Image: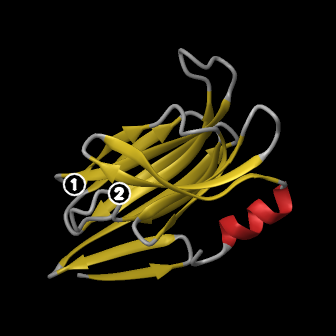
């Protein structure tokens, strides 16, 4: 399998089958995630502000998923906050793989690095943590901390670093 990344558009080539996830911002609170394959085009409306989109093989099945950061409330956390949604290609259709309400702390940002979701989080004291999560079965599970209870500048440097 070959992966080609080109400024905001992601293409996975498996034999002669290609898929592309793209995100179109319609307004501040509406974006559309589009999956285009050789034979299909499907869309998923995201009626929330989106702060980041990345792609990668999150679940290790050889297919590329879309990781989308949205700002929304949840039933148990009614204050709008940053959440992480992961979408997959299911027979040419965009379908949720995981709609996360929270990771370990308050999510500030995320990246997909080396098969892991790297998060920048804060705690109730305003301290910053950088953690990594892996896919296991139904969702993301904590793997390790890269830095804990740190000030923002040092945590952001660790968060952005390609390899810890």
Q: Residue at x 40, y 61 (%)?
A: 21
Quadrant of the image containing the N terminus: bottom left
Residue 143 percent location from the top left of the image: 44, 54
Query: In this picture, is 46 found above or below 114?
Result: above
* Picture quadrant of residue 40: bottom left
* Picture quadrant of residue 80: top right
Left/right of residue 104 with respect to residue 15 in the rendered view: right
Residue 158 percent location from the top left of the image: 70, 68
| The one of 109 and 132 positioned closer to us in this rendering | 132
Judging by the rendered image, the residue that carries numbered circle 2 is 35
How many numbered marks does the figure carry? Answer: 2
Query: In this picture, is 71 found above or below 159?
Result: above
Kind of element beneath mark 1: loop
* Circle on res. 127: none
Q: Residue at x 21, y 62 (%)?
A: 61
Kindly indicate whether the residue at mark 2 contacts the one at mark 1 (C-beta within 8 angstroms). Answer: yes
Query: In this picture, is 80 found above or below 4?
Result: above
- How packed is label 2: few (under 14 Cα within 10 Å), some, or many (20 or more)? many
Left/right of residue 63 with respect to residue 135 in the rendered view: left
Judging by the rendered image, the residue that carries numbered circle 1 is 92
- Mark 1–mark 2 distance (CA, rounded to whole Å): 7 Å
Q: Residue at x 57, y 47 (%)?
A: 69
- How packed is label 1: few (under 14 Cα within 10 Å), some, or many (20 or more)? some
Kind of element beneath mark 2: strand
Left/right of residue 129 with respect to residue 33 in the rendered view: right
Quadrant of the image containing the C terminus: bottom right
């Amino acid at each position: 399998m070959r992966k080609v990344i080109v400024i905001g558009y992601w293409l996975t080539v498996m034999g002669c089958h290609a898929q592309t996830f793209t995100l179109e911002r319609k307004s501040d609170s509406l974006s559309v995630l589009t999956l285009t394959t050789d034979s299909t085009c499907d869309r998923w409306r995201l009626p929330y502000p989106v702060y980041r989109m990345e792609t990668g093989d999150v679940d290790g099945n050889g297919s590329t998923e879309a990781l989308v950061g949205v700002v929304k409330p949840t039933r148990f956390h009614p204050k709008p906050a940053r959440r992480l949604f992961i979408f997959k290609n299911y027979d040419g259709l965009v379908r949720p793989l995981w709609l996360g309400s929270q990771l370990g702390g308050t999510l500030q940002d995320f990246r997909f690095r080396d098969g892991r979701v790297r998060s920048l989080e804060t705690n109730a004291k305003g301290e910053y943590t950088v953690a990594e999560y892996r896919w296991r079965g139904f969702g993301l599970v904590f793997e390790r901390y890269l830095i804990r209870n740190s000030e923002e500048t040092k945590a952001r440097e660790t968060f952005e670093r390609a390899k810890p």
